[in-house]
Amino acid sequence: MQLRLGDERYLTADGQLRTPLALLFVLALFLRGYLAWIISLTFSEDRSRLLQFFYSNTEQFVLTLSVGLPALAVVVMLTQMKAEMPGWVTRFARIAPWLLWLSWIADGVLLISLVAANWPHFAFVKALIIFSWLIAFWLLLYSRHLKRFFQLLASEEESGDD
């Protein structure tokens, strides 16, 4: 790993890469279907009650889960960040930003369809999700922390060969 001046903010005290908060926010946005599903499993009597609050039908829920699949692959990659990383992690880090963009585009199509289906009706939750989606756009496009994190993660392979 070729460190530059200022890269110490991307490392923990023991020298491991630290996952940026912006990446955690973006992943939580794209994986909101999975998060709602996991939280709904904690309800003992009616597990579908929380899901019905966010999703009016099963198709919307399944579409939200499919939007999160590329982001879920990035989460699996992040779980493998260790001192001795498998080789696929560094190769996958090169395509991870593209997978996040794919999730962002698919999520935008889903949000447009949800807003169009309920056009005159205002829902604060949907407005909050749209605002978060726009923040995710800004983070994916302009965040130096995310770009440098993926660069450092992809360069782990080169430093391991020395």
Image: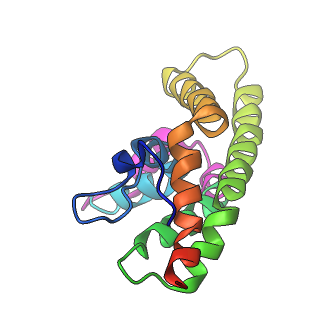
- The quarter holding residue 151 reads bottom right
Q: Between residue 122 and residue 151, name the one nearer to us.
A: 151
Residue at 40% x, 84% y is: 84
The stretch drawn in magenta includes residue 54:
yes
The residue drawn where x is 39% and y is 47% is 50
Residue 52's place in the image compared with 99, above or below, is: above
The residue closer to the viewer here, 56 or 127, is 127
For residue 107, above or below residue 1? above
Residue drawn at (37%, 76%), measured in percent from left and top? Answer: 82
Q: Is residue 75 above or below residue 39?
A: below
In reply to whether residue 7 is colored magenta, the answer given is: no
Q: Residue drawn at (59%, 16%), measured in percent from left and top?
A: 122
Q: Where is residue 81 in the image (x, y as percent from the top left)?
A: 41, 72
| Residue 143 position by quadrant | top right
- Closer-to-camera residue (35/138): 138
Q: In this view, does 100 lie above or below 134?
A: below
Q: Where is residue 124 in the image (x, y as percent from the top left)?
A: 50, 20
- Magenta region: 43-65
How far across and down, in percent of the image, does residue 149 sit?
51, 53
| Magenta span: chief secondary structure | helix
